Image (cartoon, rainbow, N blue to C red):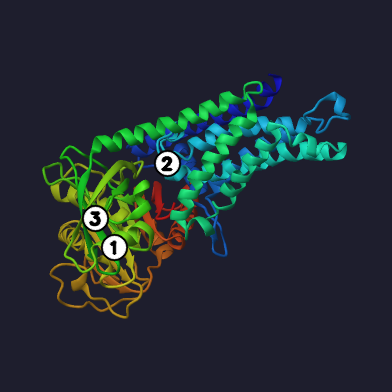
Amino acid sequence: MKADVDYAQTTIYFFCTGIALLAIFQQIMYWKTRSTGSSGRGFGDRLIALTRYFSSRQFRIGNYYSPTLGVLFILGLVAAFMSGLTFGPKPYYWETMAMGDSPPLATRSGYISIAVLPFMISLATKINPVGVLVSVSHEKLQVFHRWTALFMYVTSLLHTFPFIMVNTKAGTVKEEFKEQIWWTGVAALVPQTWLIAMSWGVIRGPYYEFFKKMHFIAAILFMAFLYIHCENILTSWNYTYATTGLYFASFLIRNVRTIFNGLRRATVQQLPDNMVHVSIPVPKGKKWSPGQHAFIRIIGGGVGLHSLSSHPFTIANLPTGDAENKIDLVFRGYGGVTKRLHDLAAGKPSANVRVMFDGPYGGLPVSVRKFEEVVLIAGGTGSTFIVPVLLDLVQALKNGDAIACKKVSFILAVRGNDSPAWMKSQLTLAREVAESHSVHLGVHITRAATVEPSTILEGEAEVEKSRDSSSIEGSDEDGGNPVGFHTGRPNLPKTLTEVVRTCGGKLGVAACGPESMLYDVRNTVASLELDVLDGFGKVKEIFLHTEHYDW
């Protein structure tokens, strides 16, 4: 029992204390952002700027993009704590086998591993207490799930090898492997090794459908063998019970909600540029916020084994609140279930498929309506996240709603002229509002020599002369027009720096796109946060929210 108290429960207290502190600090941050304080910059504003520098700053090594500096700091604290608790106490081994069968190093690392288990599994679930407490959506917690799993794997190895070394020296390894506690430990370590090795982005990303199914199977095997391995020594089974309870609570809530939402008949349409549009009718009372996503389960429709799992898609529209209420999903048919749905509607005006959905999840933690100026940045299919945010703002401006936002800049970067076909009506509405409000739309076509505005906006017959991609959105280089068409990639660092230079209040920035785009946005905002911290410029606060269309 002493080992449980000294190592396992100490680990539990450390994690719980850290989560509680993060929850309190996060709520203070959100309260400060939502408040309408004085125009000056006080200590609280500077502290927020410093915190957001850490939450934005990122590093790149070749094609690898690190977690943000803030995440690295938290992971560093966890690693330091677990290392200190593992290697701090002495001895590591008993002087003789007569002093004990379990090497002290193995005992410590074993109880640390089992204590991390409930947090590691909970961080992987769609509905978990950590996300609720710190007001962070499940996909933002995946990085902590992966790294705590790696830390647990290291302590699991530190638990295993001292036993092997001691018994190899004593010549009793073969004898010990006949014991259940030995072979089940190795049996648990095998799927755990698979889980860690296959979870790296270079494998997980390109083969996500395979990864997802095998990850689930390996996790079941790992938990089963671990349960047998623990043999209820001291209180070890309590941690497996807690883990099981947390997982199945999330599983039950999600599936009950999915069943409650019912079976829906969705319409599938092919769009230009290999895009797919899925429209799902929902009850008029169903609501969601801009930028949220849902998990869709396809029933039948020729998708094969993909029917066994649900798939995340960003909701690309706003709720109407009437009998015509529907969820619109827009995505590119890359492979897996997206390719199956793309092929389902091939050569047809549309096709029908039965679906079930669970959601909404995620979205912006703070409405961008709270900021005097807003910059929205979308790259490729990341537009499905940003366009509803833009539409929410322009509708509020059009209706004369009492919102703080007075100026909106929308920057869209897509591959071809036909890529934004699905958002043509939304961009047209934004242009109409832009004529009487401070709204600017900047469209960048990255893989075409010229821009064809008629494919992007309704009523655009003339082709505007393409401008240099480094032109500032909404500047005189657009000739005072509310819409600017450009070829090439946008110069986001230059654009954001110019916006901050003229913004005299709170600035909200939301971006969704490929990792390279988000890297530029995050690091530019991080450097601008230091200007806020130092008191330069007129901007009081910069809020950044980024979404990457990868899991």
Nearer the viewer's eye, disc 3 or disc 2? 3
The earlier-in-sequence mark between 2 and 1 is 2
Badge 1 element: helix
Q: Give the image location of residue 111, x and y in percent.
A: 66, 29
The earlier-in-sequence mark between 1 and 3 is 3
The residue positioned 47% from the left and 57% from the top of the image is 205
| Disc 1 residue type (three-letter) | His
State whether residue 310 appears in this view. no
Label 3 sits on residue: 278
Badge 3 element: strand
- From what the image shows, is residue 415 above or below residue 430? below
Q: Residue furthest bottom?
A: 449
Badge 2 element: helix
The residue positioned 39% from the left and 37% from the top of the image is 30
The quarter of the picture where the N terminus appears is top right
- From what the image shows, is residue 318 above or below residue 492? above
Nearer the viewer's eye, disc 2 or disc 1? 1
Label 2 sits on residue: 138
- From what the image shows, is residue 301 above or below residue 273? above
Viewer-proximal residue, 545 or 402?
545
Q: Give the image location of residue 360, x and y in percent.
A: 30, 41
Task: Give left or right: position of 514 versus 81.
Answer: left
Label 1 sits on residue: 342
